[in-house]
Amino acid sequence: MAVKFYQSENQVPLEMHKVRVVQKLTLLPVEQRLKCIQEAGNNTFLLQNKDIYMDMLTDSGVNAMSDKQTAAMHIADDSYAGSETFNRYKAAVKEVFGTDYLLPAHQGRACENILAEAFVKPGKVAIMNFHFTTTKAHITRCGGEVLELVAKKGLLPQSDDPFKGDFDLEELKKTIEAYGPENVAFVRVESGTNLIGGQPVSLENMLAVADICHNYGVLSVLDASLLQDNVYFMKTREAQCKYMTTKQIYHLLADKMDIIYFSARKLGFARGGGITSHNGALIKSMMEYIPLYEGFLTYGGIDVRTIESITEGLYESLDMDYISHGPEFIAYLVKELDDYGVPMIKPAGGLGAHLNCSEIVPNLPHNQYPAAAVGAALYIAGGIRGMERGTVSEQREPDGTERYAELELLRLALPRRVFTLSQVKYCADRVKWMWDNRELIGGLQWVEEPKVLRFFFGRMKEIGHWQEDLVCKFREDFGDSL
């Protein structure tokens, strides 16, 4: 239940935790920020953390751990096999999902690799509401094809629809019939669609997808990495979930889906991952790949102390006081910017606040990478590192032509339990300044372009000298201030 303030003008999200460990931050002068982003090839992934004030790149593996998580790390059993740490991890998965079988893997993309190796063959298709970068890369590497069937509402930048990540159910049936069930590797539900603004999927839609898969004899797979955010939205936006406990929702989904996998870098506030299921035969079909790619079946490439922190974090993922923090801070930032006129993805989703860069710099074509340009501009403006979620995050077609993104977004992630409200307000202030000076933002062009996952380590340079002009305007407006 939300905490209301006596004076409505003071209403803000209220943290249900206190900070007991701090990490010093640095805010460089704007001239140094310009130098840093240019040395990083205008790729925020290549910035050094020491040069960043607010790291809003991702919520993956950078969430604050609780006191209980930190304490749990001291009881880790480092046995190679038969580890009690793994038994505790398995018991937590059983409590949260109700499932009996667990394969550990070092993070979500490791789980995706296992799924691709086990089920994707040349000529097969994997159907999903929307792709994620690494998911698609693993599937295409194995010769498969990714088909996206998010409902049309999901690609509308702004709407009142509470569940823009939903599958188009009729298209799902038609697609399975068109390709033939035998040619569908699996249907994957991403519960919180990463690349279109962290938009959630309704419980009703997820259950309908599972039923369709079962009717056609096709595997249903749930990517539960962002499920805790998604459950928050179910509880607050979906009538049938209002009086369900979080655990009831988790269990119902696990009962319906054939396979669930997750990145504990998101779900559980730690680092690591896992694949779980009620179906022992499916687990056995993937089991051989764990020792091959990850490690033994009781640690899967994860340090045992980290496994203990995941275990406690999974229990915390059932607590609405904890899982509400991210979505409520995101909603606050989105409203602050939307009220000012900054084009935002609405309604606010999980992961972070998403700037609609196609509307911020409408004159920049896709091949000048507007989302990456806005990301570079925001770092110059405030020492804030966001993540490009637009055309740079796509990969070129086999013939070398550019695959333009459906949406050109800059994600400002809000790792859970990390930032204070004053930092969120600082972020809003610098975005507002950038918006007011958006006519100065120009395009980018490739200098070094990797063939796969180029957004991780590719390099670009500014077209013209717009970044220097932005620094001059900053000094004009802010004087000696950082």
Image (cartoon, helix red, strand yellow):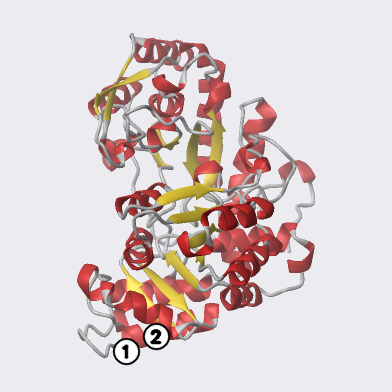
Quadrant of the image containing the N terminus? bottom right
Can you identify the residue that label 2 sits on?
88
Q: Are marks 2 and 1 in contact (CB under 8 Å)?
A: yes
Which structural element holds mark 2?
Answer: helix
**Nearest the camera: 325 or 401?**
401
Q: Dot 1: what SS?
A: helix
Q: Residue at x 24, y 35 (%)?
A: 450
Q: Is residue 92 above or below residue 144?
A: below
In the displayed structure, would residue 45 be above or below residue 316? above
Q: Position of residue 40 (x, y in %)?
A: 25, 30
* Mark sitting on residue 317: none
Q: Residue at x 32, y 84 (%)?
A: 85
Q: Can residue 325 be seen here?
A: no
**Horizontal relation, residue 25 to residue 365: left or right:** left
Q: Is residue 91 left or right of residue 150?
A: left
- In the rendered image of this protein, does residue 190 appear above or below residue 439? below
Q: Which residue is mark 1?
A: 84
Q: Residue at x 29, y 24 (%)?
A: 460
Whole-angstrom CA distance, mark 2 to mark 1, is: 6 Å
Determine which quarter of the picture holds residue 274: bottom left
Q: What amino acid is at disc 2?
A: Arg
Q: Residue 320, position in %: x, y?
A: 62, 67
